[in-house]
């Protein structure tokens, strides 16, 4: 896209929205059906593109990207009527005859800026919510997963109304041009550094943003666990997509006395998952670019490598690598790793682990492996993070009934399932007042009197929740109120 095109593309989306092309539930449903058909018919094109970009195995592309989105579409189709219908709210006694409700309105034009590591999921999954909520949209896939971006831009116009859904490809300069335009909501997935750029650009138009960022997600391992099970779950989440998963366990925290048995369980698990040489395994991914390859490798320099450590620049391959004797100040502990390198950071006890987590930026995900409910409760009560899973990893991201998002440096806002619909909907407060009954309302009009003020306070004042006696008093008050209203209205 050239610089001159950004205003044209964005205007087209605004025009389509103003023309009401996505207003009715029928057109939203049609767009969702078209999207589902596109995904179903072009599945292999997407799988192939992601294999070229990341050597992503078909299993991972289908299970954790394509089927994720399909499930979200089906969820939206099944529930759209319910999600979109006006939501009646409770009213005080004096407004009983005055309907009040929340109307779910589309914001207008949404910009989705995707990242490269799950290129399908991070563009198509938010798209489901954007469409369900009735917005028009411009998708800017990451230029780093180039093959995927090319396929998406090719197939979207073949299946979806191109006034309502447009895909724009290009590098940083294209994203920069788009960000100069006015959107009604921006969802950005990627690093915190660019997240700040996006937020700054959005602030110029007072556009609200959802930021899906990253960071270091810790995994605490307690002494009492079944170490083989823990190793399998831990490494499944860590080495999927060659560690390029925003919610991958970034580092392990355990007592030094756990190291030996954890390391031998990890050696066995790596063999079980990827064979003797992970480089030859069809199920093991590659770094997305030379720059990312060099960055991850540089984090292992001067470290004590307990397992792995091999690499091959020609394939952007980094072996599953475990680092021990890690210090807080080591490079590997200073930034999100985002690659197949797992440091084991030793702590003396759970208190130290909790203090360490709380001294850092709020993580996107936090994992606790323990058989003790008390230990899990301590992490649940005494830390904060975007998501928390005990005795497994990643699971929260797969449940459409849970919100997905970060907190603080790991992001703001959330989506998935109904949370996507809510994120892309304005909740308009609506009251349909009765054109008559003005006598009842006359106490609010000037000239003000003490009597009117007392009456207002008595009728509008909220009552504290209380026990049986309180309920009896409340019932009596309602009775008196009803009699007063009857007298006023008579
Ligand atoms: P990236 O390089 O693909 O960048 C993401 C988008 O930002 C791209 O579309 C790119 O065009 C745009 N961009 C890059 N630089 C820009 C600039 N200077 N100005 C304007 N736009 C710019 O992705 P990345 O940043 O390498 O992503 C990796 C990060 O994303 C990791 O921290 C990871 O944890 C995080 N992430 C988070 C989630 C989540 O759901 N929370 C998911 C995936 C990745």
Image (spheres, grey):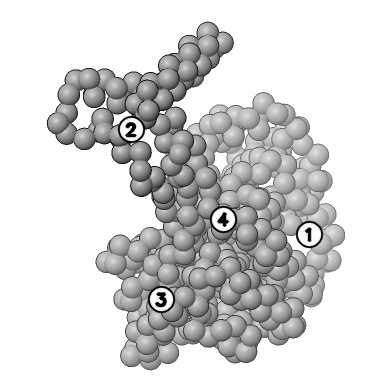
The nearer-to-camera label among 2 and 4 is 2
Per the image, the residue denoted by label 3 is 18
Element assignment for label 2? helix
Residue 67 x, y percent position in the rendering: 73, 68
Residue drawn at the location 63% of the way across and 30% of the way down: 377
Tell me which residue sits at (52%, 79%) in the image.
165
Q: CA distance from mark 4 to mark 1?
A: 50 Å
Secondary structure category for the residue under label 1: helix
Q: Which of pointers 1 and 2 lies earlier in the amino acid sequence?
A: 1
In the image, residue 26 sits, relative to residue 41, either above or below, namely above
What residue is shown with label 1? Answer: 270
Q: Residue furthest left?
A: 447
**Which numbered disc, 2 or 3, marks the residue closer to the eye?**
2
Q: Residues within 10 Å of mark 1 (few under 14, many from 20)?
A: many
Q: Which of these two is toward me, 141 or 322?
A: 141
**Do the residues under discs 1 and 2 have CB atoms within 8 angstroms?**
no
Mark 2 or mark 3, which has the lower sequence index? 3
Q: Residues within 10 Å of mark 4 (few under 14, many from 20)?
A: few
State how far apart marks 2 and 3 are (Cα): 40 Å
Mark-to-mark CA distance, 3 and 4: 21 Å
Left or right: residue 243 versus residue 225 is left
Q: The N terminus lies in which quarter of the figure?
A: bottom left
Circle 3/circle 1 CB separation < 8 Å: no
Sequence-earlier tag: 3 or 1: 3
Which residue bears the numbered disc 4? Answer: 85
Which callout, 2 or 4, points at the residue further toward the start of the chain?
Answer: 4
Please identify, in this view, whether the residue under mark 3 or under mark 1 is nearer the observer: 3
The nearer-to-camera label among 4 and 1 is 4
Give the labeled residue for mark 2.
Answer: 440
């Amino acid at each position: 896209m050239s610089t001159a095109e950004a205003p044209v593309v964005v205007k087209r989306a605004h025009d389509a929205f103003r023309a009401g092309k996505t207003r009715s539930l029928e057109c939203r449903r049609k767009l969702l059906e078209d999207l589902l058909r596109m995904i179903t018919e072009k599945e292999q094109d997407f799988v192939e593109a992601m294999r070229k970009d990341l050597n992503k195995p078909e299993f991972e592309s289908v299970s954790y990207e394509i089927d994720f989105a399909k499930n979200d579409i089906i969820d939206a189709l099944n529930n759209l009527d319910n999600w979109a219908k006006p939501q009646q709210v409770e009213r005080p006694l004096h407004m009983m005859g005055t309907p009040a409700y929340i109307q779910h309105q589309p914001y207008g034009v949404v910009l989705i800026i995707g990242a490269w590591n799950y290129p399908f999921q991070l563009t198509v999954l938010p798209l489901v919510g954007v469409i369900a909520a009735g917005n028009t949209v411009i998708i800017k896939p990451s230029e780093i997963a180039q093959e995927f971006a090319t396929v998406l831009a090719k197939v979207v116009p073949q299946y979806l109304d191109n006034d309502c859904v447009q895909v724009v490809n290009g590098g940083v300069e294209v994203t920069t041009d788009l960000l100069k335009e006015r959107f009604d909501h921006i969802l950005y997935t990627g690093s915190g550094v660019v997240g700040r750029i996006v937020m700054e650009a959005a602030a110029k138009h007072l556009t609200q943003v959802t930021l899906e960022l990253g960071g270091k997600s810790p995994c605490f391992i307690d002494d009492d666990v079944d170490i083989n099970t823990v190793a399998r779950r831990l490494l499944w989440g860590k080495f999927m997509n060659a560690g390029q998963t925003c919610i991958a366990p970034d580092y392990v925290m355990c007592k030094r006395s756990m190291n030996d048995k954890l390391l031998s369980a990890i050696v066995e698990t790596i063999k079980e998952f990827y064979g003797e040489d992970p480089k030859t395994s069809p199920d093991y991914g590659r770094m997305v670019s030379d720059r990312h390859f060099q960055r991850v490798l540089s984090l292992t320099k001067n470290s004590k490598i307990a397992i792995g450590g091999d690499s091959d620049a020609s394939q952007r391959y980094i072996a599953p690598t475990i680092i021990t004797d890690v210090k807080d100040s080591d490079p590997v502990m200073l930034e999100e790793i985002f690659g197949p390198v797992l440091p084991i950071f030793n702590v003396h006890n759970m208190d130290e682990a909790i203090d360490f987590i709380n001294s850092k930026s709020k993580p996107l995900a936090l994992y606790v492996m323990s058989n003790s409910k008390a230990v899990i409760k301590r992490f649940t009560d005494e830390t904060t993070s975007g998501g928390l899973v005990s005795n497994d990893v990643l699971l929260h991201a797969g449940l459409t009934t849970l919100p997905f998002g970060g907190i603080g440096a790991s992001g703001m806002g959330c989506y998935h399932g109904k949370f996507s619909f809510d994120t892309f909907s304005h909740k308009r407060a609506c009251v349909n007042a009765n054109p008559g009954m003005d006598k009842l309302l006359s106490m609010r009009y000037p000239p003000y009197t003490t009597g009117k003020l007392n009456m207002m306070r008595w009728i509008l004042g909220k009552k504290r929740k209380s026990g049986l006696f309180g309920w009896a008093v409340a019932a009596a008050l309602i009775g008196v109120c009803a009699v007063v209203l009857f007298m006023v209205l008579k």
